[in-house]
Amino acid sequence: MQNKKSNSTTNSQKGKQSKDNSSTASMQSSQLMKLFEEELKDIYWAEKALTKAIPKMIKNATSEDLIDALENHLEETEQQIVRVEQVFEFLGKKAVAKKCEAMEGLIKEAVSIMEECEEGAMCDAGIISAGQKIEHYEIASYGTLCQFAETLGLEEAVTLLAATLDEEKAADEKLSEVAMNAINVEAAHQDA
Ligand SMILES: [Fe+2]
Ligand SMILES: [Fe+2]
């Protein structure tokens, strides 16, 4: 096999190798923008999947407090989808969802917990546990998205994403509260 190499121009190109700072910065910024868009597609898929998963959790929940918390967060989730679409619009991009393997796994885990538990306090405790893992994933995602948007100077996107981040944190806290108030205690009693 032939393996031809052309060495004729390598020396003369050496002087052109150094890039100025501004072009390096703009390259980094376009890479960050790409990453930002990828993360946005991921969370868009995740939020849409949650609008189908949360109703199943509501159906399997028993505690009124838990049902209220989930119903409230389902409404918020629908609004969060609109916000992600607004961020896409702001970027001048079409809203595209890209399958989020992590969220798919977390939802599968929630479904299998609900299938394994009988309705009641134990099932509620399982729903809370799965729900909190989901919220923590979302908190991590929106935290990153906010940071990226800030670095990229996308102020409108920061405002939209920060609003959702606050809702995810509040949803997580609400689930902790519901768990502490009743469910875990009841589940322990049932266990006997
Ligand atoms: Fe969400
Ligand atoms: Fe959430």
Image (spheres, grey):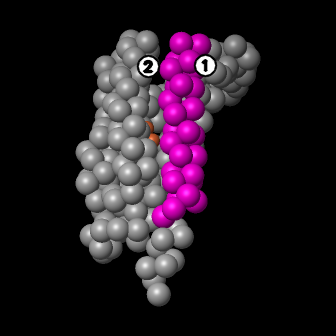
As for residue 171 lying within the magenta part, the answer is yes
| Pointer 1 local density, CA inside 10 Å: few below 14, some 14–19, many at least 20 | some
Q: Residue placed at 46% from the left, 35% from the top?
A: 39
Residue type at tag 1: Leu
Q: Quadrant of the N terminus?
A: bottom left
**CB atoms of marks 1 and 2 within 8 Å:** no
Q: Of residues 83 and 147, which is closer to you in this image?
A: 83
Majority secondary structure of the magenta segment? Answer: helix
Q: Residue placed at 63% from the left, 29% from the top?
A: 147
Q: Quadrant of residue 40?
A: top left
Of labels 1 and 2, earlier in sequence is 2
Residue type at tag 2: Val
Q: Residue placed at 39% from the left, 44% from the top?
A: 68
Q: In this picture, is 129 found above or below 95? A: below
- Is residue 2 something that shows in the picture? no
As for residue 181 lying within the magenta part, the answer is yes
Q: Of residues 149 and 84, which is closer to you in this image?
A: 84
Q: Which residue is mark 2?
A: 87
Pinpoint residue 80: horizontal percent, then vertical percent: 41, 29
Q: Which residues are magenta?
A: 154-183
Give how far apart the Cα atoms at labels 1 and 2 are. Answer: 13 Å
Kindly identify which numbered label has been placed on residue 192: none
Q: In this picture, is 161 found above or below 171? A: above
Q: Which residue is mark 1?
A: 152
Q: Is mark 1 within 8 Å of ligand 1?
A: no
Pinpoint residue 161: horizontal percent, then vertical percent: 52, 26
Classify residue 115 as left or right of residue 82: left
Classify residue 57 as left or right of residue 87: left
